[in-house]
Image (tube, rainbow, N blue to C red):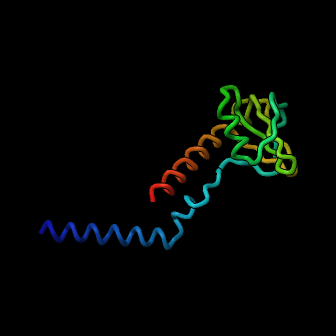
Amino acid sequence: MYFYSGICTVVIFINFFQSSLASGTCSRLQNPEPRGQFVDKKLNVSSYFALRAKDLKLCGSQCLREKKCKSVNFEEEFKLCELNEQSHLTSPNASLVPAIGVVYMPVEELEDLRVSLFNFNKNKHSM
């Protein structure tokens, strides 16, 4: 009796796993995308520090190294990374304004991006 219930559990698990793969549920792990990035937007308050960064991930990792950084504006064309002491979530006088070619991201979403990238790289190397 226990043998048959164990087999049924394994069969159910395999079916679930196959249907998840078929539906693309795991595809987000292949290319993790941040949920809270704002394309063609920037924070209207002035930044406290600007630097050059190859991409948004490097810009975000610089922000995560600094306690006072609450958000970033990243301008793709010039590889300009602006670190902000405020975010649209933490400051009542901060708002998002249109800015073509700029991506804004608050630190909370940068942290989520770092965790998803870490998990993705860890899973990729363990295979």
Q: Please, is residue 125 above or below residue 114 in the view? A: below
- Residue projecting furthest to the left: 1
Relative side of 31 to 9, left or right: right
Q: Height in image: 112 above or below 5?
A: above
Write the residue at 80% across / 27% down. Answer: 48
- Which of the 4 image quarters holds residue 70? top right
Image quarter of the N terminus = bottom left
The image quadrant where one finds the C terminus is bottom left
Percent coordinates x, y for residue 82 in the rendering: 80, 36
Question: 117 or 9, which is in the foreground?
Answer: 117
- Identify which residue is drawn at 84% across, 36% down: 44
Q: Where is residue 91 shown, x and y percent of the image?
A: 74, 29
Residue 78 picture location, percent across and down: 87, 47
Where is residue 115? Give x, y as percent. 55, 45
Q: How many marks?
A: 0
User: Image quadrant of residue 68?
Assistant: top right
Determine whether 51 is above or below 41 in the image: above
Return the residue nearer the eye: 1 or 31: 31
Q: Nearer the viewer, residue 88 or 56?
A: 56
Residue positioned 56% across, 49% down in the render: 116
Residue at 70% x, 36% y is: 62
Question: Which is nearer the eye, 89 or 111?
Answer: 111
Choose top left, top right, bottom left or bottom right for residue 7.
Answer: bottom left
